[in-house]
Image (cartoon, rainbow, N blue to C red):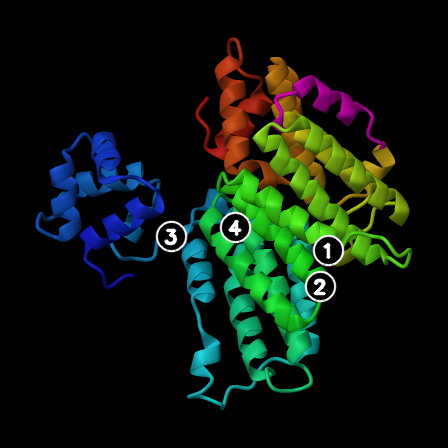
C-alpha cells in the first residue's frame, strides 16, 4: 500500500475503521465534500498538522499515512502494533497454491520442524505473549502455507494441512484478542477450509470455535451460536467410546455457544449449554489441554462467570469466582487466568465496586500483562474504573492505566 497516494491511504484506513465519510468529516471538523476531495486526490494534504489530526482520528501511526514503516513503540513491546497487523495481513493474503504452478524450486521446512514451531506458537499464545507471537506469525504463516503447497500431492499432505490449519487458528485467536476482528474471522475461515483437507473432524471443530469467537467479536451473536451448536451436535458423545480429545472439543463448542447465548440474553440456553459442557468436563476428569483447548471443570466455571457478566449479572459472576478451586485455577495457563480476572473486574464494575474491579485488573496484569494492557475490552474496563473512582486512584492503578495508555 506504500505506493498509493495519501488520499487513497486515508480512504483505506477510514473504511477499515468502519467510518462513513460523514462521520469521519464530523470528527475532523471538516465537510464531507472536503473528505471526498482528499480521498480522490483532488485536494492535497500539504499540512503536517492536518495529517497528524487525521492519523489521530483514525487511531493510526502517522507514518502509515505517509507510506512509511512506523517505528515500533517501546511501550507497546508486549502488544501488537500496525506494523505487525499489516505483516500478518500480507501473509494471510498470500496464494502460494497458485504460485506453485510456476515455481517448483522451493524446498519447504521438514514437518518435524514445523510441528515444533507450531507448538511453540500455541504456548506463546496461551502465555499471552502477544507481541512475541505477532512478530513470529508472518513467517510462520508463510512457512506453513508453503509447506501445505509443497506437500499437497504426497503422503504428508494431511499432516501439512493440519499444521497450516493450526497456524490459522493461532492467528485468528491472537488477532481477535487485539481487536482485529475481521482479520480474525478471515484466518478462522481459512482454518475451516484447510481442516477439511487435513481429514480431522476435531481440528474442524476447533476451527469452528475460532469462527464463532470471531463472529461474536463482530457483534454477530446468533450466527456464532448456530455455527458452534451445529458442529457440537456432530461431535456429541453417544457411543461410550469418546476420547478426551473429542470431549474437549465438544465441550469448548458448547462453552462458546453459551457465550453467544449470553450476548443474546438467552439465560435458559446459557444454563443448558454450560451444564452440557460440565458433563463433558467431568467425563474427562481434571483440566487438560487437548487440542489446545484448556478444557476441564475449572474452565467451565470460568465460562460460567464470563457468561454471567455478559448477562449483566455481576454478583453471580463474583459468586462463581469465589467458589473456584484455587488449585485447579492455578494449574491453568496464564492467558486463561488473566482473561478470567478481566471478566471478574467487569463483574465487580457492574456491582459498582470499583476498588475490587481495580484489584482484579492488577492481578490480571501480574499474571499476564499483555492480556490486560493490550486488549480493547480491558481498556474499556480501566476507563470505567477511573471515571468512577473518587479522588485520585491508587498509585498502582494509576501506573497500570499509564502503561495501558488510558488517561487518568
SS of the residue under disc 1: helix
What's the magenta region? 310-325
**Location of residue 88 with respect to 299 vertically, above or below:** below
Q: Earlier in the sequence, mark 4 or mark 2?
A: 4
Q: Residue furthest left?
A: 42
Residue with the mark numbered 4: 175
10 Å crowding of disc 3: few (<14), some (14-19), many (20+): few
Q: Position of residue 120 (x, y in %)?
A: 68, 62
Residue with the mark numbered 2: 201
CA distance for labels 3 and 2: 42 Å
The quarter of the picture where the N terminus appears is bottom left
Q: Residue at x 28, y 51 (%)?
A: 12
The label on residue 71 is 3
Q: Nearer the viewer, mark 1 or mark 3?
A: 1
Q: Earlier in the sequence, mark 1 or mark 2?
A: 2
Work out whether residue 17 or residue 106 is closer to the camera in this orientation and state it: 17
Q: Residue at x 47, y 60 (%)?
A: 88
Amino acid at each position: 500500500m506504500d505506493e498509493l497516494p495519501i488520499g487513497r491511504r486515508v480512504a483505506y484506513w477510514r473504511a477499515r475503521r468502519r467510518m462513513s465519510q460523514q462521520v469521519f468529516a464530523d470528527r475532523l471538523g471538516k465537510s464531507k465534500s472536503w473528505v471526498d476531495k482528499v480521498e480522490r486526490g483532488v485536494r492535497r494534504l500539504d499540512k503536517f498538522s492536518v495529517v497528524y489530526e487525521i492519523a489521530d482520528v483514525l487511531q493510526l501511526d502517522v507514518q502509515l499515512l505517509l507510506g512509511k514503516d512506523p517505528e515500533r513503540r517501546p511501550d507497546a513491546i508486549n502488544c501488537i502494533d500496525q506494523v505487525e497487523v499489516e505483516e500478518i495481513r500480507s501473509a494471510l493474503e498470500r496464494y502460494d497454491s497458485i504460485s506453485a504452478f510456476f515455481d517448483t524450486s522451493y524446498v519447504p521446512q521438514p514437518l518435524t520442524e514445523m510441528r515444533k514451531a507450531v507448538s511453540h506458537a500455541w504456548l506463546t499464545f496461551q502465555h499471552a505473549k502477544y507481541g512475541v507471537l505477532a512478530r513470529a506469525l508472518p513467517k510462520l504463516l508463510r512457512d506453513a502455507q508453503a509447506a501445505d503447497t509443497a506437500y499437497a500431492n504426497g503422503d504428508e499432505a494431511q499432516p501439512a494441512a493440519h499444521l497450516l490449519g493450526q497456524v490459522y487458528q493461532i492467528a485468528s485467536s491472537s488477532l481477535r484478542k487485539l481487536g482485529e476482528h475481521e482479520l480474525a474471522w478471515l484466518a478462522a475461515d481459512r482454518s475451516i477450509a484447510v481442516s477439511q483437507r487435513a481429514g480431522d473432524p476435531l481440528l474442524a471443530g476447533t476451527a469452528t470455535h475460532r469462527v464463532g469467537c470471531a463472529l461474536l467479536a463482530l457483534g454477530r451473536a446468533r450466527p456464532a451460536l448456530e455455527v458452534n451448536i451445529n458442529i457440537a451436535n456432530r461431535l456429541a458423545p453417544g457411543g461410550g467410546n469418546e476420547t478426551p480429545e473429542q470431549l474437549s472439543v465438544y465441550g469448548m463448542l458448547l462453552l462458546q455457544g453459551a457465550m453467544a447465548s449470553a450476548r443474546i440474553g438467552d439465560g435458559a440456553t446459557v444454563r443448558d449449554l454450560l451444564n452440557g459442557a460440565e458433563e463433558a468436563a467431568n467425563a474427562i476428569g481434571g483440566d487438560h489441554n487437548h487440542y489446545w483447548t484448556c478444557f476441564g471443570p475449572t474452565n467451565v466455571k470460568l465460562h460460567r462467570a464470563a457468561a454471567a457478566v455478559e448477562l449483566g449479572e455481576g454478583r453471580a459472576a463474583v459468586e462463581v469466582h469465589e467458589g473456584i478451586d484455587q488449585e485447579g485455577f492455578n494449574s491453568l495457563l496464564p492467558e486463561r487466568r488473566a482473561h478470567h480476572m478481566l471478566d471478574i473486574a467487569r463483574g465487580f464494575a457492574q456491582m459498582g465496586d470499583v476498588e475490587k474491579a481495580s484489584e482484579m485488573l492488577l492481578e490480571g496484569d501480574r499474571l499476564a500483562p499483555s492480556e490486560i494492557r493490550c486488549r480493547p475490552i480491558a481498556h474499556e474496563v480501566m476507563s470505567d474504573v477511573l471515571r468512577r473512582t473518587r479522588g485520585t486512584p491508587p498509585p498502582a492503578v494509576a501506573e497500570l492505566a499509564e502503561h495501558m495508555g488510558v488517561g487518568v
